[in-house]
Image (cartoon, rainbow, N blue to C red):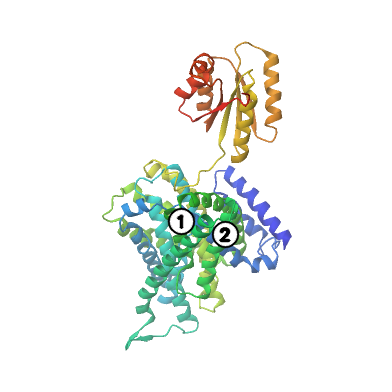
Amino acid sequence: MLESIIWILLMGFFVGQIARRLKAPALVGMVLVGILLGPQLGNVISPEVLGAANSLRTIAVMVILMKAGLGLDREKLSQQGTVALRLGFLPAACEAISIAVAAMWLLEFDFLTGLLLGCIIGAESPAVIVPGMLRLKSLGWGVKKGIPDAILTGSALSDVLLLLVFSLLLAFLSQGKATAITLLGITLSPLQLLPFQILIQITLGVLLGWVTARILVSLLVKQNWTQTAVQDSLVAAGFALGLVVSAEHIPVFSGYLAVMAAGFFLIEFDAPLARRLRGGFDSLWTIAEIILFVLLGASIQLNVLGNTLVVGLLVLAIGTLIGRSLGWYLSTLGSNWTGKERLFLLAGNSAKATVQAAIGAIPLAQGIAGGETILAIAALSILVTAPLGAWAIPTFAPKLLEKGEVDPTKVAISGRPVFLAAVDASPLTTDVLTKTADLARRSDGDVIVLYVDNLGDKSTNLQLQQQAQRILSDIRYEFLSLSGTVPEEIIRVAQARQVTYIAIGKRGHQPWEEVLVGSVSQAVLETSPIPVILVESSYK
């Protein structure tokens, strides 16, 4: 079992990076690794790991939905009015119905079996859509109108709808358990009960998300049960997973929606805690993503794809280009979305992966007629739309969406900070390097040590390099020696290298001293567009 985990993590990571370097989404490489290691080809993954695949996928989906909730923007959602709500119902419903009709025509399914297939294929993949939308938010694409937020919310709601209809149809087709219920003397069929079930699932999901967020704020902020951001993330992940597991045993609310709602309410209740959790769940997703997509690839049955390849592609095309497109049009009707922004939904709101991997094999296991075909088309939808969606979201966003100002309170800031330490031959250099090293260690940042040498003093240059090596030995750093006007060179290098902060020594403690010997730091402080950290001497 441990050997299988090693294969999954290492091969999933490195092949994913190879795919990224080839300008393809990393998940493509991860899925291919799953196919290669899975029972269809290499048969390297142990039965114990394959048996735990559903549980591991559940954990991964929990992580990505918490990330989605922590990235939502209430103000942008309120600007969209009912667009997000309509995106949660109309595209999924139209796609499911169009697939049901296509399945009756192409696969000779009855309508209910076709609708079962439609519910599986129509569900959107949070594992593809959530990272894509959060990345767009971090870059500013579509944020002015809240387009990524509307897609994130609509995706979660649509999965609630389709999973409910799927469970109802499955019970009816497999064991006939979907019987009528009498309430207050009125007999209601399962189909008539469906709107009430959806309303209850959504309402209780949002309510439990609100309660969970309140509990987390109380434990992690007011009562200080944790001391680090890692501990915060561990506790939050435990509560979120508890929501998902509870929903499986008590299916009266949507566990996934509750997780997303908890993240959303955490922003409202305590923004600093939400920011810490955002970074923690980003780290968790690094591992969860590999496990999710490798196991997804391992679950694909290649031997059943051949017989349904052409028909399956036609069903997918009808569902997306006819059904889902109609739903997108109706969802954005009357909104302030432009034609290009509506067209972006084809790239940003079509990916299938997570739900299809989780429920695609259930009809076959339950003995539903056509179950093998349903599983094959579910696998085909993953292989076709997941890579396309992961590629299309970043590719078409700059072409179809308007770029706006990034809200750093709603996204995780990725990338290492870079500190520029401006040094000279004075004793202040030790303090500047020590302070910069401390900041870099705290934030896992990089350092550029800059010495503006206009005298050509090789001994001073060598001495500064040795000093930097001693103080920054455990930090990624680069030593630069240039000539020119000192303040101008510091600012030029900082801008050219996209430095996060400039650290520079400040001599003197009296106004007259600053005028005489503090002219460089003062000039940089007054003219730099980049934040400047002034380091005073430790010698009094």
The residue carrying pointer 2 sits among few (fewer than 14), some (14 to 19) or many (20 or more) residues within 10 Å by Cα, namely some
Circle 1 residue: 266
x and y percentages locating residue 244 in the rendered image:
52, 67
Which of the numbered marks, if any, corresponds to residue 356?
Answer: none
Q: Amino acid at mark 1?
A: Leu
Dividing the picture into quadrants, the one containing residue 233 is bottom right
Kindly state the secondary structure of the residue where label 1 is placed.
helix
Marked residue nearer the N-terminal end (1 or 2): 2
> Residue at coordinates 52% horizontally, 26% vertically from top-left?
494
Of 377 and 432, the residue lying toward us: 432
x and y percentages locating residue 447 in the rendered image:
61, 31
Of 527 and 144, the residue lying toward us: 527
For the N terminus, which image quadrant? bottom right
Circle 2 residue: 235
Count of marks, rendered view = 2
Of 12 and 105, the residue lying toward us: 12
Instruction: Give me the C-alpha separation between circle 1 and circle 2.
Output: 14 Å
Residue 162 vs residue 353: left or right? left
Residue 386 vs residue 474: left or right? left
Q: For the view shown, which residue lies furthest in the top direction?
A: 455
